[in-house]
Amino acid sequence: MEGDFLVVKRVTNSVPDKGDDCYNKHEGIAGRTLREGKTLVFPDISICVEAKPKSSDYRSALSIPIGNFGVLQTISTELDAFDSEDVELAEILAAHAAEAINGIRNRGEITRLTYNDPLTGALSRHGVEKFTSVEIEKSIRHSVPLSLMMLDIDDFKKINDSFGHVYGDSVLSWLVESVRMIIRSTDQVIRWGGDEFLIVLPEVTLEGAESMAERILDHLKKRTIEERAEITVSIGITSFLGDGDDIDRMINRADSALYEAKSKGKNRLRVFRESQS
């Protein structure tokens, strides 16, 4: 099931349905099976009002729910083709399928929660090494640039103290959404901690990162959130310096540049250049 539709995923060669054919989850034998949550046997589908067979040759059907998210169907060109043994075997197959699919879903959810911040949807700190190691290797191997921003909300504690933590949480989500309007789909926003975010920019030079940071600052000036507080950020920027450099050194440099931006009055950016290292 995908949204309001049951989508055909696997068929035998004798069935005319094609993979990814869609059916309303409230209609047909499959819809009724999912709705009632139990095995349904149709000895003669010609007298079943829900039946919408793809072929006039179909005479009987066996339909079994797969959990609450799918349906396993067996169709025959003979009347009353399915006995109790067929039902038992099909129910065993459906139960195994439900268990396997739930396992895959649970592993996917665990992975998502491990590597993504549930509040903002940004990559979590746990996912930094996995993502950046690939980009650093690519930068070394293909001599392409890689830049990094460290972004921090100005006076975030005051925002929380003045308007409450619920509003503060909405500011964090709003900020990530705002940043994503500026950066590319290949860039990655990472919640580093509290109100601090890393933005990894593959194949972007230091100058390109500086230009992107300026656009973020300008964009935030034009956006408001519930008209309560002016939200500004400070940004520190650095780039990968080549073989021997690593993500920890990059983060330290970006953090130093961020500290300078904060100390110079906030709502601005600072770039850590190679001559400073």
Image: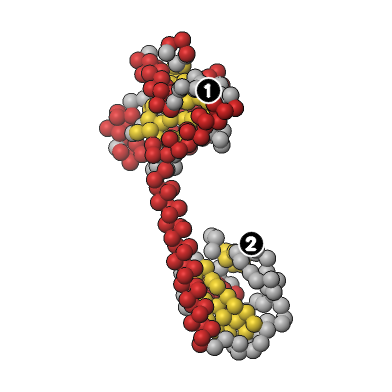
- The picture places residue 8, in percent across and down from the top left corner, at 61, 66
Q: Residue at x 57, y 64 (%)?
A: 5
Residue lying farthest to the right in this orientation: 56
Please tell me whether mark 2 sits on a helix, a strand or a loop.
loop
- The picture places residue 63, in percent across and down from the top left corner, at 55, 78
Inspect the image, locate mark 2, and give the three-letter code of the amino acid beneath it. Answer: Asp
Which residue is under mark 1? 209
Can residue 258 be seen by looking at this rendering?
A: no
Residue lying farthest to the left in this orientation: 161
Q: Residues within 10 Å of mark 2 (few under 14, many from 20)?
A: few
Can residue 112 be seen by looking at this rendering?
A: yes
Please name whichever residue, 37 or 107, is drawn nearer the observer in this view of the structure.
107
Q: The N terminus appears in which quarter of the rendering? A: bottom right
Q: Residues within 10 Å of mark 1 (few under 14, many from 20)?
A: many
- The picture places residue 65, in percent across and down from the top left corner, at 50, 73
Which residue is under mark 2? 20
Q: Residue at x 40, y 47 (%)?
A: 113
Compared across the picture, whether 14 is left or right of 262 comes to right
